[in-house]
Image (spheres, helix red, strand yellow):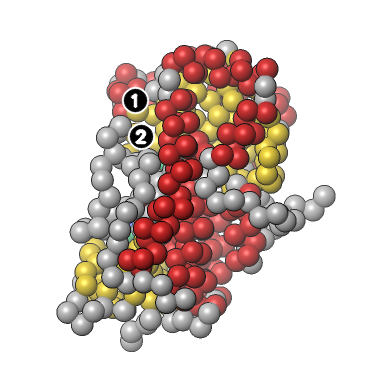
Amino acid sequence: MQDEVLVLGGGVAGCAASIALARKGRSVTLLEREPTPRHKICGEFLSGEALEDLHALGIDIASLGAVPINYVRLAAARRAAEAPLPFPAASLTRKTLDTALIATAIAAGVRVQRGRSVQSLKRTSANLWQATLDDGAIYEAPTAFLATGKHDLRGHARPKDPHHWVAFKMYYRLSAAQTIDLADASELTLYAGGYGGIQPVEDGVVNFCCVVQRSYFARAGFRWEGLLANMQRDCPHLAMRLDGAEPLARKPIAVTHIPYGYLRRTTEEDLYCIGDQAAVIPSFTGDGISIALHTARSAAAAYLAGEPAQAFQPKLRAAMLPQMRLAEAAANGLNNALARVVLPFCLRVWPGAMRVTARLTRVTQPASVAPQVFAN
Ligand SMILES: Cc1cc2nc3c(=O)[nH]c(=O)nc-3n(C[C@H](O)[C@H](O)[C@H](O)COP(=O)(O)OP(=O)(O)OC[C@H]3O[C@@H](n4cnc5c(N)ncnc54)[C@H](O)[C@@H]3O)c2cc1C
C-alpha cells in the first residue's frame, strides 16, 4: 500500500511533521530504526519555543515529569554568574519525550513502523521516493520528509564536521547539597576545548552533556575518566557540582562528527528536509529541539499549502541564517581563551547580557502568549 507521505526518522522532527500531516487527513508512514525510544545525546533543555510547539501538538510535558528551568548559570575558570531566563523553559529526558511523540503520532493515525532502518532513499522513474530498508523491504510515496537527525542517508550526506566535535551525555544523582545549589538552573561550564551543560531532569536526576574538540579528548587519552578530570580541573565549578555525585551509568553515551552551523541550501523535488537534516545549531543554545519542531511545522504547512520542497528549503534557510550565524559567533566566543576568563566577570557586573544573548540566539521568535506549562 502506498501512502501520500513517507517520513524517514521518528525523532522530534519526524514525529512532529507526521502528526501535523496526519491531523490534516494525509496518509503517512513513518520509518524509525529503533524498536523503542532510547537515551539520546542531548542536553534535554526545552526552550520557550519548544514548549509552545509541544503544547500545540497536545503533549503535556508537566504530566511527563518535566522540570521547570528558570535560571541560566555560566561558569568558567573560577567564576560563575547567573541570570533569570527571559522565557519559560524546562527539561525532560529524550527517552520520555520521544516516547510521548511516537504515541501522539500513532494516535493521530500515522502508520509508525519501528525497528525499520532505512538504508537508502532514491527517486524512481515514476517520480516516487523509494526507501530501501536493511532487510530489503521497499516503501514508496510521492513525497518524503527526511528527518534522520544526526545520521545521514547514503546519497544525502551533509558536509563533514571540520572541528571533529565529540559529544557525551551522562546522568548523575548529585549530593543533597549540590542538588539544592543547582536548583532550577541550567548551567553552562566552559573549558579550553569545549563546553558542557548540567541541569536537572525528571526523578531527581541530573543530565551532564558536553561537547569537546577531538584534540581535547585526545589529551585525555581518549578516556572518559581522563576527560572528566580535565574538565573539572579547567572548570572548578563543575568539580564542585560533581563532588559526591553518583554516576547512573558505567559509561556515558557518545557521538562524533556533529556538523555545527550546517544549514541546508537546496533539496530535491518533493523531499522536505527537517530537524538536524535542515540545520544544526551549536548545542549551548539549547535550541535544537525547537528548531526540529519549527522546521517540521513549517515543512508540513508548506506541503499542505502546495509549496514545492525546492522553494521551501531555501526560504527556510534564509529565515534561519542570521540567528544561526549569531549562535555560531557566540560559540566561537565560548571557545576563545580570553573570553572564557572575561565572560563570567562581565556577566556578574551585567547579568542582563546573558538575557540578551539568550534572546538573540533564539531561531524562532517566542509568541506573545506562552503556554501555561506548569501550574503555579
Ligand atoms: C551534545 C548535544 C546537546 C544538545 N542539547 C540540546 C538541548 O539541550 N536542547 C535542545 O533543544 N537541543 C539540543 N541538542 C540538539 C537536539 O538534540 C537535536 O537538534 C534534535 O534532536 C534534532 O531532532 P531530529 O528529529 O532532527 O533528530 P533526532 O531527534 O535525533 O531523531 C532522528 C531519528 O531518526 C532515526 N534514524 C536515524 N537514521 C535512521 C535510518 N537510517 N532509518 C530510520 N530511522 C533513522 C533515529 O533513530 C532518530 O530517532 C543537542 C545536540 C547535541 C549534539
Q: Amino acid at mark 2?
A: Val
Question: What is the x, y in percent for residue 262?
Answer: 35, 45
> Is residue 88 or residue 150 the one in the foreground?
88
Q: Position of residue 260 (x, y in %)?
A: 37, 40
| Residue 315 picture location, percent across and down | 41, 59
Q: Which residue is mark 1?
A: 217
Picture disc at residue 32: none
Q: Would residue 108 be found to the left or right of residue 215 on screen?
A: right
Residue positioned 67% across, 28% down in the render: 352
124 vs 69: above or below = below
Q: Is residue 188 above or below residue 283?
A: above
Q: Residue at x 39, y 23 (%)?
A: 193
Q: CA distance from mark 2 to mark 1?
A: 8 Å
Residue 60 drawn at (x, y percent): 67, 61
Q: Is residue 113 above or below residue 207?
A: below
Q: Are marks 2 and 1 in contact (CB under 8 Å)?
A: yes
Q: Secondary structure at mark 1?
A: helix
Q: How many marks?
A: 2
- Which residue is situated farthest in the left direction here? 125
Confirm or reject: label 1 Cβ below 8 Å from ligand 1. Answer: no
Q: Residues within 10 Å of mark 1 (few under 14, many from 20)?
A: many
- Residue at the spot x=62%, y=30% of the render? 354
* Depth order, front residue of 250/226: 226
Task: Report the front residue among 73 and 359.
Answer: 359
Rendered residue at 29%/39% (across/down) = 161
Q: Amino acid at mark 1?
A: Phe
Q: Which residue is mark 2?
A: 166
